[in-house]
Amino acid sequence: LSSKMEGVKVEEDNDFEGEMADEDDLQQYMEQSHAEEFEEEEEEDDLDDFLSDKPAKPVESAADRDARIKKELEQRKKAQEEMEKERERKKKEHEDWLNSLDPAERERYFMDQERKQRAMEEAARQQEIDKERARQEEMRRKAGAQETTKTEEGKGKNDRIENRWAYVGDRLVAEAVERKGPKKATREIQLKVPTGRVGAIIGKGGVNIKIITGKSHAKVQIHPPKPGEEEKGESLVTIKGSNEQIDKACETINQIFDQFGARRK
């Protein structure tokens, strides 16, 4: 599902620095950004080192495995023998008790046991009836839920829509697309922006990019061109945050472009 690409228009804001970043500002920003990325990589490396330092589970040799299995089988066999002895003891004890009863008491005992057996069978039949009734009710409930889902399908689609941003013409434009998979708390987008527009995003002394992150609460990073790609005249801009934070950051960048009025690719 997609819609036509439209530039997002926002209100004019006079908080942005009136001058673009010069070469010194760009150099300072790139060095600071590179240092922050290096620190994040070090933290990830420390975590990998910590995880790799965990003691490995000892490998069991074939001989030890055979010995362990043999011991477990012997223990299981011994436990079964003990259980069989206990059953024989209880059976003998019960037979001795029955033999100690007079004929009338023995008759009453057997009648009572038969009554208990019938009650147990009746309870088991009732349990099966209740289980079957519950199964049929669950089937009817699921069938009704499926019908409800079909009638409210349109509502669910709105929760799966998010903006896909790209630099087109002289500004950032958003395309509404249907998200595949579950919604994530944060995501990251990558934008290829003409290098000539990067100075406006950063601003004199980095003031503009601070305003962008302050208003949107998204993480915005500008990466220098990779070696050999300088001739393309493009810089990579990554924005990380929630859907709302990313949209706000892109809208604020468009405010900057509108204010500077630059028409360069």
Image (cartoon, rainbow, N blue to C red):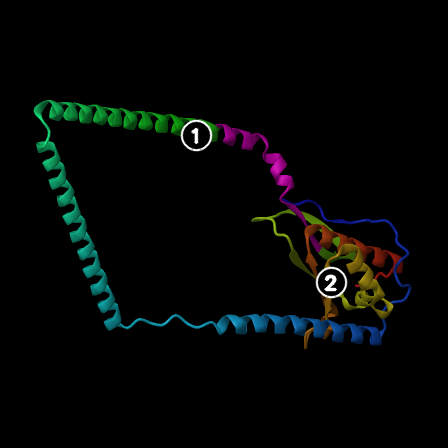
Position of residue 49 in the picture relative to residue 72 (left or right): right
Which residue is the site of mark 1? Answer: 138
Residue located at (73% from left, 65% from top): 221
46 relative to 210 in the view: left or right? left
Q: Residue at x 76, y 52 (%)?
A: 248
Does the magenta segment cover residue 154? Answer: yes
User: In this view of the protein, which residue sits in the foreground, 74 or 16?
Assistant: 74
Q: Return the x and y of residue 180 as percentages of the image width and height.
A: 57, 49
- Quarter of the image holding residue 196? bottom right
Q: Position of residue 229 (x, y in %)?
A: 69, 73
The label shown at residue 100 is none
**Mainly helix, strand or loop, the magenta region?**
helix
Question: Is residue 53 one of those drawn in magenta?
Answer: no
Residue 82: image x %, image y %? 17, 52
Which of pointers 2 and 1 indicates the residue nearer the eye? 1
- Confirm whether residue 170 shows in the render: no
Q: Quadrant of residue 46?
A: bottom right
x, y percentage for residue 20?
87, 67
Disc 2 to disc 1, how far (Cα)?
50 Å
**Over which residues does the magenta segment extend?**
144-165
Count of numbered tags: 2
Q: Is residue 247 visible?
A: yes
Q: Quadrant of residue 3?
A: top right
Residue at 71% of width from left, 46% of height from top? Answer: 4
Residue 138, placed above or below residue 156: above
Q: Nearer the viewer, residue 175 or 204?
A: 204
Quick check: 193 left or right of 2?
right
Mark 2: amino acid: Val
Q: Which residue shows up at 9% across the image and 26% down it?
A: 102
Image mark for residue 220: 2
Q: Quadrant of the C terminus?
A: bottom right
Along the polypeptide, which appears first: circle 2 or circle 1?
A: 1
